[in-house]
Amino acid sequence: MAMQKNKMICPKCGAEMNHHADKLVDPVRPEDMKHVNPALSGVVEEMHYCPRCGAVASRHAD
Amino acid sequence: MTNNRPLSIPVILGTTRKGRMSEHAARFITRQIEKRDGVKTELIDISKLPMPVDDAGDGIKDPAFSEKMVMADALVIVTPEYNHSFPGLLKHVLDSCLKEYIHKAAGIVGVSAGPFGGVRAIQDFLPVMRELGLVNIFWDVNFGSVSKVFDESGKLLDEAFVSRADKFLNELIWMAKTLRYGRDNIALDS
C-alpha cells in the first residue's frame, strides 16, 4: 500500500480530491531534476480528481 | 461519491489542412454524440487554437483548451492519415496537456483518401495515447475513401457509418462512465 499523504483539496470547489494515479514523467525543466526518482528514472506525479466538480490537479510524489 | 454531471465528450478535429475531409467526419461524429442523453459535446478544431511552434509541451498550454480537457470524460480524436501517420500539429496540441487526460477514455476516428480508413495513423497513435494517460477503446471508426462517404457539403452518403458510429460511441460512453467512477471513488492505494 502506498504511503498515505495529505488529501489534495480541489482548487475549484474545496472538496477532497481522490488520488487515482501516479504518472512517471520526464524531467523537462532544470527545476524538475531535484524531483527525479533515481530508481524510476523520472519524476512521479500524483494525479488527483475532484469527485464533486471534476477538476484535476497534480503534485510531485516526493 | 459519484457526481451527476453529464458526460463531456469533445471531438477533436486533428488537422489544419485546407479542404480537409476530416471535418465532415468530425461534424458527423459530433452530431451522433449530440443525440445521446446525458452527454454533451463540442467540436474542437485544432486550427482555431493558439498553438505557437516556438515552444512545446505545457509551455504552450492554452487555458481554454486545457479547461475543456479537464472537464472531458472522454475524447474522440478525428485524425487523417498523412504520409502513413497522424498530423504533427495534432500531437503538438495534445502534448500541451497531461494531467487533464489521466484515466479518461479515448476513441479514434481515422480518415483517409485511400481505402484503409486511417488504420496506419491509428496504429501510430496508440502508444502516444497510452503515454498521455488516455484509455483507448477497442472500437474505431474508419472513413476510408472518404470522398465516397461524404459529398462536398458534408452530407453522409453511406448510412452504414451510422451504425458503426453507434457501436463506437456505446463502447466509448461505457468506458467514460467506468473511468469517471474510478476517478471519483477508487484511490490508488485503496
Image (tube, coloured by chain):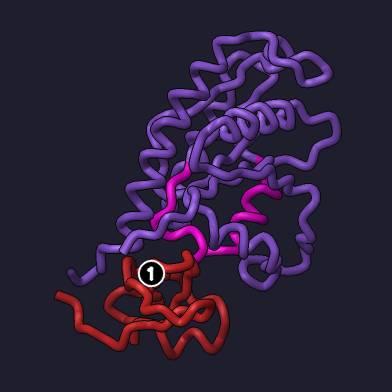
Chain colours: A red, B purple
* Residue visible at 53% across and 49% down in the picture: B8
Q: Is residue B71 left or right of residue A36?
A: right
* Residue visible at 60% across and 35% down in the picture: B34
Q: Give the amino acid at mark 1.
A: Leu
Residue B131 visible somewhere in the drawing: no
Q: Which residue is mark 1?
A: A24
Q: Position of residue B170 (x, y in %)?
A: 42, 30
Q: Nearer the viewer, residue A21 or B18?
A: A21
User: On the rendered image, what quadrant is the N terminus of chain A found in?
Assistant: bottom left
Residue A31 visible somewhere in the drawing: yes
Q: Is residue A46 left or right of residue B43?
A: left
Which region of the structure is painted magenta?
A: B87-106
Q: Tell me which corner region of the image, top left, top right, bottom left or bottom right, holds residue B151.
A: top right
Q: Tell me which corner region of the image, top left, top right, bottom left or bottom right, holds residue B45.
A: top right
User: On the rendered image, what quadrant is the C terminus of chain A found in?
Assistant: bottom left
Q: Residue furthest left?
A: A1
| B57 over B128 or under it: above or below | below
Q: Chain of mark 1?
A: A
Q: Position of residue A9 (x, y in %)?
A: 42, 83
Q: Nearer the viewer, residue A5 or B81?
A: A5
Q: Position of residue B52 (x, y in %)?
A: 78, 63
Q: Residues within 10 Å of mark 1 (few under 14, many from 20)?
A: some
Q: Nearer the viewer, residue A27 or B117?
A: B117
What secondary structure is found at the residue carrying circle 1? Answer: strand
* Residue visible at 43% across and 39% down in the picture: B173
Q: Nearer the viewer, residue B130 or B102?
A: B102
Q: Position of residue A3 (x, y in %)?
A: 20, 83
| B103 inside magenta stretch | yes
| A38 inside magenta stretch | no
Q: Is residue B112 left or right of residue A37?
A: right
The tally of labels here is 1
